[in-house]
Amino acid sequence: MPEKLTNIETQAWVGLVKSQQTLLDKVEAELKRHGFPPFSWYDVLLELDLKSEGRLRFNEIGKRVLISKYNVTRLLYRLEEHGLVRREACVEDGRGTYAVITKKGRDLRRRMWPVYREGVRKHFLSHFNTKELSQLVEFMRRIRNINQ
């Protein structure tokens, strides 16, 4: 196996990583421009709001969100300080803790959604046709399934 990546391999890898960060930065800028908190807040609130009971264990949230996993606990404490989530002890496992979305958290997430949606459309979806999006979905599926 060659020690170096080829030029196209380097471009593909760096392009993928930079594209993700660029898109998240642009969506976050849209949220900020409309007076909303960072994308990471939306990401966590969405995962909680998607659950019918509105709660997930702290470690489950880290597996589901798009943001860096190492920041999740600190972010949950900030959301709690703002009254957007509350902590709840895990009865089944005394060591675990649930994050539970509050009404205030659900309301904020719902107000953020239109700005988030339009940011995704403007900075990402509008640059591709349906066929290209389908191909991209397949490429991303293949990447996620590598070594599984």
Image (tube, rainbow, N blue to C red):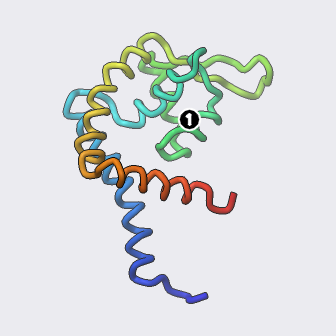
Task: Single out the residue that lies furthest toward the front.
Answer: 131
Circle 1: residue type: Thr
Residue 81 falls left or right of residue 130: right
Q: How many marks?
A: 1
Residue at the spot 26% in from the left edge and 38% down from the top edge: 119
- Which element is circle 1 on? helix
77 versus 27 height, above or below: above
118 versus 82 height, above or below: below
Residue at the spot 55% in from the left edge and 59% down from the top edge: 143
13 versus 129 height, above or below: below
Q: Where is residue 47 in the image (x, y as percent from the top left)?
A: 52, 29
Graded by Cα atoms within 10 Å as few (under 14), some (14 to 19) or many (20 or more), the crowding at tag 1 reads: some
- Asked whether 128 or 41 is in front, the reply is 128
Residue 119 falls left or right of residue 71: left
Residue at the spot 48% in from the left edge and 82% down from the top edge: 5
Classify the position of the C terminus by image quarter: bottom right
Q: Quadrant of residue 142?
A: bottom right
Classify the position of the N terminus by image quarter: bottom right
Residue 136 falls left or right of residue 77: left
Q: Quadrant of residue 88?
A: top right
Task: Single out the residue that lies furthest toward the left.
Answer: 33
Q: Where is residue 9 in the image (x, y as percent from the top left)?
A: 45, 77
73 versus 126 height, above or below: above
Residue at the spot 56% in from the left edge and 89% down from the top edge: 2
Task: Single out the residue that lies furthest toward the top.
Answer: 103
Residue highlighted by disc 1:
73
Q: Where is residue 43 in the image (x, y as percent from the top left)?
A: 44, 34
- Asked whether 54 or 99 is in front, the reply is 54
- Asked whether 77 or 118 is in front, the reply is 118
Q: Position of residue 72 (x, y in %)?
A: 53, 38
